[in-house]
Image: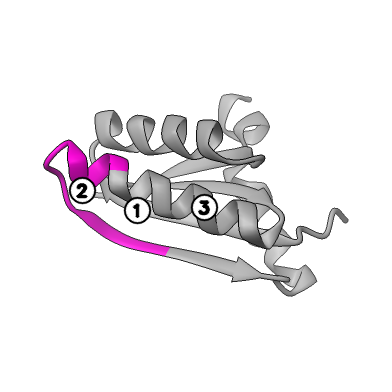
Amino acid sequence: MNQYEALGLIETFGIVYVLEAADAMCKAADVELIGFENVASGYISVLVHGDVGACQTAVETGVKAVVDMGAEVYSSVVIPRPHPDIEKIIERYSIENLLG
């Protein structure tokens, strides 16, 4: 199992906004894109991992990017030192699993 130092997540409405958030997150800090999930009715979550400070910077920048486009961020969070069992959920949303 790969233990992440921190996870950063943003949920917004629409693929355009989530792509803008993901791009801003990856450019703003040394984080790696884990994947995404189309939650329901157009809401999409994007997940990154890295150290705590990098995830915090990435999430703040991603939220700002979405808001600057005139959209609403439904939720965002940084989880420092997530419990190892969280990996069971994260694996489902990895890009490798989503693309097959």
Direction from residue 68 to residue 38 in the image, left or right: right
- Residue 11's disc is 1
Residue 63 within the segment the image draws in magenta: no
Residue at image mark 2: 41
Question: Mark 3 and mark 2: span between their CA atoms?
Answer: 28 Å
Location of residue 73 in the rendering, given as x and y in whole percent from the top left corner: 25, 55
Q: Mark 3 against mark 2, which lies toward the viewer?
A: 3
Question: On screen, 93 above or below 27?
Answer: below
Location of residue 97 in the rendering, given as x and y in whole percent from the top left corner: 64, 34
In which image quadrant can residue 81 be found? bottom right
- Residue 57's disc is 3
Q: Secondary structure at mark 3?
A: helix
Q: Residue furthest left?
A: 70
Q: Which residues are magenta?
A: 65-76
Instruction: Check disc 1 and give the amino acid type.
Output: Glu
Direction from residue 79 to residue 71 in the image, left or right: left
Q: Residue at x 37, y 38 (%)?
A: 21
In which image quadrant can residue 93 be found? top right
Instruction: Check disc 3 and give the amino acid type.
Output: Thr
The residue carrying pointer 1 sits among few (fewer than 14), some (14 to 19) or many (20 or more) residues within 10 Å by Cα, namely many
Is 10 in front, or is 59? 59
**Of callouts 1 and 2, the N-terminal one:** 1
Direction from residue 90 to residue 15 in the image, left or right: left
